[in-house]
Amino acid sequence: MNQAKHIAIIMDGNGRWAEAQGKKRIKGHEAGAKVVKEITTYCSNSQDIERLTLYAFSTENWKRPRLEVEFLMKLLDNYLKNELEVYLENNVRFEPIGDIRAFSKSLQKTIAMVQKETSHCDGLIQSLALNYGAQDEMIRAINTLKNQEGDITPEMFSNTLDCKHDVDLLIRTGGDKRLSNFLLWQAAYAELFFTNTLWPDFSTKELEKIIKKFNKVERRFGGLK
Ligand code: IPE
Ligand code: IPE
Ligand code: MG
């Protein structure tokens, strides 16, 4: 039986969830943040799951209206400050990925603070992908490695990425079947699950169902059964 040690989720559909109820898109992001908490807590209680990597803000999301971007930054700041206690209670280590240098100094400070305060936690590792794009991540790694002597090996490359761990199970909510620049290297052999459920409606129950299906998949990694 497969073990879903590293689960990655593209949390999509917040805006549509809000619009369907005649609400502003930002209400969907607020509702989505509650689900992040619920799913993280669930994963922290699982014996099998070691890592949960969540796509929160992409390198492409800066294209959104300024007010929505500003709201997302504020929401992230509040989320991290409010959830610190929950991270600690659940022994969850927070490890952001992405290029956070693009964020305001005060948001960078909050991110660093939560990372430091949870650095001793040895339960689940929750990575939020913040100003993350897989192409940007790979280009940054190439720039770091380019002056090394000799050939770059896959191990060297992988160890220079923000996320150094292969994904077992990649889930996208919201109905679209694309990766939107998420973990392109690490998901090389991930099992992909797409659900029409909008992120604010996603639940631990649905996650459990997906994990059960994942457990039964025959993963061959290019070999034979
Ligand atoms: C995902 O939900 C959250 C972020 C990208 C920040 P969306 O905001 O993309 O919601 P939809 O896809 O427009 O419904
Ligand atoms: C992917 O969702 C990014 C996050 C969930 C943070 P998007 O809504 O930005 O993706 P596209 O634009 O539909 O590909
Ligand atoms: Mg979307």
Image (cartoon, rainbow, N blue to C red):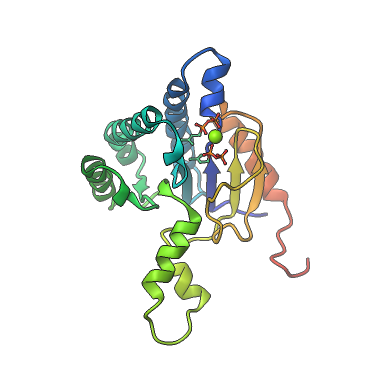
The residue sitting at the bottom extreme is: 150
Residue sticking out furthest to the right: 225
Rendered position, 96 above or below 14? below
Q: Residue at x 48, y 84 (%)?
A: 151
Of 6 and 97, the residue lying toward us: 97
Percent of width and height locating residue 147:
37, 80
Tell me which residue sits at (55%, 32%) in the image.
204
Q: Can residue 124 be seen in this view?
A: no
Between 203 and 113, the residue placed more toward the observer is 113
Query: Going by the picture, which residue comes out furthest to the top?
Result: 22
Q: With 60 as the anchor, is 71 left or right in this view?
A: left
Q: What is the quadrant of the C terminus in the image? A: bottom right
Residue 102 is situated, as x and y percent measured from the top left of the image, at: 31, 48
Quarter of the image for residue 66 reads top left
How many numbered discs sit on the rendered protein? Answer: 0
Q: Which residue is drawn at 25% across and 48% down?
A: 112
Whether residue 59 is visible to the viewer of this picture, yes or no, is yes
Q: In this view, does 195 lie to the left or right of 109?
A: right
